[in-house]
Amino acid sequence: MSLTMNQLKLNIAKLHFRIDTSGLKPWVFRELSENFSSFINYNGDISDETLEVVTFKTWKKGRIDPVLETVIKKCLKNPLEKFPFRDDPDKDVADFFKYLKSFFIDKRFRSFIEGMRGSKEIVVYPVSRGCLLRKGQPARSALFIKTGFFRGPQINSICEAIHISASMALPIKGSIMLHGVGMRRQGIGHLFLGPSGGGKSTIAQMSPPEDVISDDGIIVEKGVSGFNLAHAPIDQSIFYRDNSKMRIPGNTVLNMGFFLKKDNSVYLEEVSPSDACSIILKNHIHYFRYFPPKSVENSFSLISDLCRNVPFYRLHFRKDSTFWSVIDKEIKKVYSSQETDNGLNKKRQEASL
Amino acid sequence: MNRKVSIRPDNMLIKRENNKSASLDEKMIFRMRQDLLIERFDDQVLLFNPEKNLPYVLNRVAAYVLMNTDGNKSQETIAENICAEFDVEFHQALEDIKSIYNDLIEKELIIGEEQYLQSAK
C-alpha cells in the first residue's frame, strides 16, 4: 500500500518522492491523493526526495538573528536574481523577506536551515502563502505554509512545492521536466515547447484530448531505445481541479520536438541540434536556475543527448489544427525510406508495449 | 590560389555590440573557465556557464580558439595554429582571436591567466 496515513509516496518517472503531510487536515490529504493519484504507485521505504509540509496557525513576530537574516536573504536573492520573470529582484527579496519573518521564530524552520554555510546549499523559494526550503544534500525540502485560508491556496502551495522539488530532483534519475506539451499521435510521441502564452494550450486544445500526455509540464526520460515522454505532476487539470481528463499513463517514445511560434501561416523550420539544446537550456526547463550543480550537469548531458537523437523544428502555426498535416507530412518525409519506415514501426510497437 | 577565409564568429550566438578588439592587449594570456560544460556537435560547440545558467553556441573556429585557451598558449601561438589549420593570414587570425576573446571575456567564459593565478592563491 503506497498511501499510508499522513504520507504520500509518489513515483514520478522513477523518482521516489515521499511527502509528509502529518500537519495537514484530512481533507487536504484526500485532495492531494486525488490530484496525484496517477503517481501513487510506489511502495518502497527509500525515497530520493522528501517534502515535509509544515503549517502555521498564526503569524508570529520574533527577533531574527542578523547572521541568519543575511544568509536567508542571500539564499533568496541568488535564485531570484537569476529568475527570468522577476523585474526587480531586490524589491522581491525585500517584500518576500517581510513575509518570511513570521516563520523564523519556529524551531522547525531554524532546524531546517541549521548548519548551512552558503547560498548554494539551500534554495529559498517563495510560493503562495508560504515558502519552500530545499537542501540539495540530502535531497530534502520543507514547505512552510499558513493555514486558515481557503483550500485552494493551500493545495496550490503544496502542488507548487511538489513541482519545484520534483523538477530539481528528476535529473538524478536521468529525466527532466520541461515546460511544454506532450502528445501521443498514432502511437508516437511529439514534444511541443513554448513559453507562457506561446501556444501550448492552443496546441493541446486543437488536438484530440485522448492524445494529450501532459498539457503544461512534460517529463522527458532516457529509455533503452531512445527518449520517452511521461506525464508530469504539473498539469493544468490539477490546478483547475478537474480530474476528469486522465492523462495518458506510462511512457511514449519521443519522435520529434517542436518550438512553437505563432504565425499566420503554418510551416516547419529545422533547428540544428546545438541550437535546439541552447534554446531548451535557456527557456524550457522548469526551475533550472534553482538546480543544484549535479542536477545541472545531468540536465546538460541529457538535453545534449536528446537534441543529438531527436529532430527539432520551429513550428510556425495558427489557431487551427492544420499544423498536424504539416507535421504528418514531415514524418512521412523523414521516414520515407523502407529502412526508416521499419524504424518508425519499431517505435510504434515499443510505444504500444 | 589559396582562398583566405575570415574566422570571425558570425555564427556565434554571442552578439558583438561593437568592435573592441583594439582594446585587448595581445600579450595577455587567457584561460577557459574550468567549470564550463561543453558538448561538441558536428560543426558547432555548445557551452554552458553553470554560474549564470546560460548556454552559448560557438562555430568551430571560435570553439577552436576557446579550446586552445589553456592558460599557456599566447594569442600569437593560437593564431599560428589557426593559420595552419584554417588557411588564413596571421594578422587576420590575430585580429579575429582578439575579437573572439572580447566576446568570451564579456560573457565571462575566459579569464586572464594573471587573474586566475591570483584567485588560486
Image: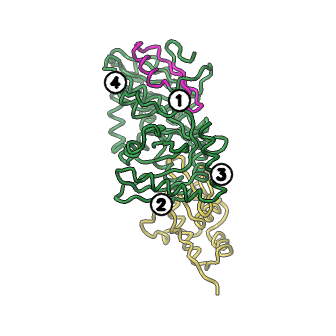
Tell me whether marks 1 and 2 sit on the same chain.
Answer: yes
Q: Which mark is residue A342?
A: 3
Which element type, helix, strand or loop, lies under badge 2? strand
Q: Which residue is mark 1?
A: A135
Callout 1, which amino acid? Lys
Q: Earlier in the sequence, mark 3 or mark 2?
A: 2
Q: Which mark is residue A152?
A: 4
Which element type, helix, strand or loop, lies under badge 4? helix
Chain of residue at mark 4:
A
Question: Which residue occupies 59% across, 62% down?
Answer: B44
Marks 1 and 4: which is nearer the front? 4
Mark 4 Cα-neighbour bin, 10 Å: few <14, some 14–19, many ≥20: few
Chain of residue at mark 2:
A
Q: Which residue is mark 2?
A: A269
Q: Is residue A343 magenta?
A: no
Marks 3 and 2: which is nearer the front? 3
The colour with which the image depicts chain B is yellow
Residue A154 lies, in percent from the top left, at: 37, 23
What's the magenta region?
Answer: A8-37
Colour pattern? by chain
Is residue A345 visible in the rendered image? The answer is: yes
Tell me whether marks 3 and 2 sit on the same chain.
Answer: yes
Structural distance between the alpha carbons of marks 1 and 2: 41 Å
Q: Earlier in the sequence, mark 3 or mark 4?
A: 4
Q: Nearer the viewer, residue B111 or A3?
A: A3
Q: In green, which chain?
A: A
Question: Which residue occupies 53% across, 29% down?
Answer: A135
Q: Quadrant of residue B42?
A: bottom right
Callout 2, which amino acid? Glu
